[in-house]
Image (spheres, grey):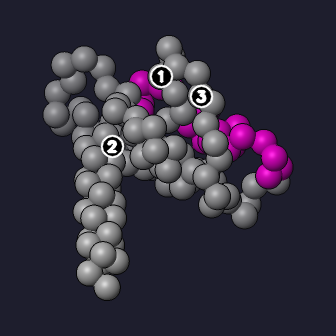
Amino acid sequence: MLQLPHQSLQVAVPPQRSAAREDQDAPWHTEAVCRRDEAGLFFAPSKEPTAARLSREDAAKRVCARCPVMVECREHALLQPEPYGVWGGLTAAERRVVLARRRRRETEIKKAASAA
């Protein structure tokens, strides 16, 4: 999803850009499929039952899967980091896992470099 209602979205565009995009100078989020869907699909209502949350997240991920800027959206959410919602096909919990793996990999690279 693009943004929470109270946030403005001013981000640098990640280097990976979709080859299918026609106007490469436009901000990535102008091509996002989720701009045409309800925000409620991407952000949980308070006290949402688990089964409903999983179903909603699955539906949001299906929207993301057909989005031409999914990679850019995902990177935005990882770099911010966005604490809520489905962004780039990942839930907040899935993004935390990706970020932890990246940190672990960076630590391993630094250790290897210092050992060499």
Examine the rendered structure and indicate whether residue 92 appears above or below residue 44.
below
Q: Is residue 82 visible from the viewing direction of this image?
A: yes
Disc 1 from disc 3: Cα separation: 9 Å
Point 45% across, 38% down: residue? 80
Q: Which mark is residue 4?
A: 1
Is residue 25 shown in magenta? yes
Q: Mark 3 against mark 2, which lies toward the viewer?
A: 3
Answer whether residue 34 is magenta in the image.
Answer: yes
User: Quick one: 84 or 68, which is closer to the camera?
Assistant: 84
Work out whether residue 28 or residue 80 is closer to the camera in this orientation and state it: 80
Which residue is tagged 2? 91
Position in image of residue 3 (x %, y %): 52, 27
Q: Quadrant of residue 37?
A: top right
The residue pinned by badge 3 equals 9
Element carrying mark 1: loop
- Look at label 2 and name its amino acid: Thr
Q: Residues within 10 Å of mark 3 (few under 14, many from 20)?
A: few
67 left or right, relative to 109: right
Describe the element under mark 3 as helix, strand or loop: loop
Q: Quadrant of the C terminus?
A: bottom left
Numbered label attached to residue 29: none
Marks 3 & 2, CB-CB < 8 Å contact: no
Q: Residue furthest bottom?
A: 116
Residue 10: name its quadrant: top right
The residue positioned 34% from the left and 77% from the top of the image is: 113
**Labels in figure, total:** 3
Q: Earlier in the sequence, mark 3 or mark 2?
A: 3
Measured as percent of width and height from the top left, residue 62 is found at 45, 49
Q: Residue at x 52, y 19 (%)?
A: 7
Mark 1 vs 3, N-terminal side: 1
Q: Which residues are magenta?
A: 23-42
Q: Amino acid at mark 3?
A: Leu
